[in-house]
Image: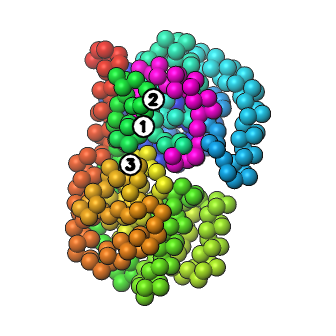
Amino acid sequence: MKILFTPSDNNMAGAFQSMVRLCTILKNEYGCEILVLLRKGGTGQQLLDENQIPYVKIPSFNWIVPDKPTSTFRRIELFVRTVTKPFAKIYNKYAQKRIEQLIRKEKFDIIHLNTTYIYVPALAALECKVPFVWHLREFLEEDQKKRIWNKKYGYALISKADAVITISTSLYQKYKEILPTKTLYKIYNGLDENYYYCPNHKIFSNNKVKLLMVGTINEAKGQIQAIEACSSLLMRGIVNFELCIVGDITKYASALKKHVEDIGLKEYVKFVGQQRDTVSYYNRSDIVLVCSRFEAFGRVTVEAMMGGCLVIGSNTGGTVELIENENTGMLYSCGNSEELADKIEIAIKNVENSRQMAARGQKFMMENMTASMNAENIYQVYRSILGKDQ
């Protein structure tokens, strides 16, 4: 089976990591021949090289714009995208022709679009009459405050996919109202259990409680809620903790860092920048905070729970599918930093119960969210599309 994978970005973000792991398993365990089509250069190429996955580059523009922007920056972004849209469409026509040439030359069996953001490979697949899979990984309007620039056209195109894969029940529920259900699947992301699983991780073994947040630092991910919760903990007299925030030091992150200094939390909240080896951070942390506005899935939640950490997450999106409150982790009302502080305090003051919750969470992830399970489910979708064993 020969598959062309098409990601949106080329970086170390969760969607790209998930794709690389999927490609690796399909190649090594199912004998698939894989080629990745990149839109631009980036750090993700290192992952592809390390896993011996070949790739080519054909630049194109995505079809995502800000949705009802309120900030000046987003309004300018929408204006620029609107003005340059005719040019982008012309450029994408050229990109489509190049992708069509690639498809015909390599004789791919399936084209796999790994994101909602891109669409040009789908047009090329249709023109070449090659089956294509569309992997929807994002809550656009709900989480990222973005949308497809022409929803009617966009959803009509996605509807032509031979299979549409959503990565959580909540995402499936959204799209079953928009897309044909006969081609719509829910397949949870899978993580490399051999990499993230830490069976000997005993949380709350040190004098200082280690809190952790991992991922993109922006408003949607809710780092400010965690910072406010830390401030509340101090006001309650709880001082034996430290919050480590892992993620790119963007303009927003720099503003948060200054805010931390201004309110006197510099000793308790640390920004360490983007780290490739997040496992070492999980292995020395007790509680991982997931404060996102609306996760489509929640890769960090799974990583942390596989690693044996207690996860406290917001009660929205895919997070509520991954955490059973008070059983495999803890949930709080999204946006309520005082309630988040309450949950952290409960966890700190009930160590044995917290350890038991973390252990149950780890067991659940190892039984349900491994990369091997994800690859098997997606491979079966491919077989169904092609209508024969490969």
In-image side of 23 versus 197 (left or right): right
Asked if labels 1 and 2 touch by Cβ distance under 8 angstroms, the answer is yes
Give the magenta-colored segment's residue range.
Answer: 142-168
In-image side of 44 versus 388 (left or right): right
Residue 133 in the image: x percent, y percent?
Answer: 43, 25
Disc 2 to disc 3, C-alpha distance: 19 Å
Disc 2 to disc 1, C-alpha distance: 7 Å
**What residue is pinned by disc 3?**
318
Q: Residue at x 56, y 69 (%)?
A: 271
Can you tell which mark lies on residue 178?
A: 2
Residue 30 in the image: x percent, y percent?
Answer: 31, 29
- Say which quarter of the image contains residue 58: top right
Asked if labels 3 and 1 touch by Cβ distance under 8 angstroms, the answer is no
Tell me which numbered mark, 2 or 3, is placed earlier along the sequence: 2
Q: Residue at x 30, y 32 (%)?
A: 377
Kind of residue sitting beneath label 2:
Ile
- Say which quarter of the image contains residue 8: top right
Residue 60 in the image: x percent, y percent?
Answer: 65, 30
**What residue is pinned by disc 1?**
174
Nearer to us of marks 1 and 3 is 1
Position of 384 relative to 166 (above/below): above
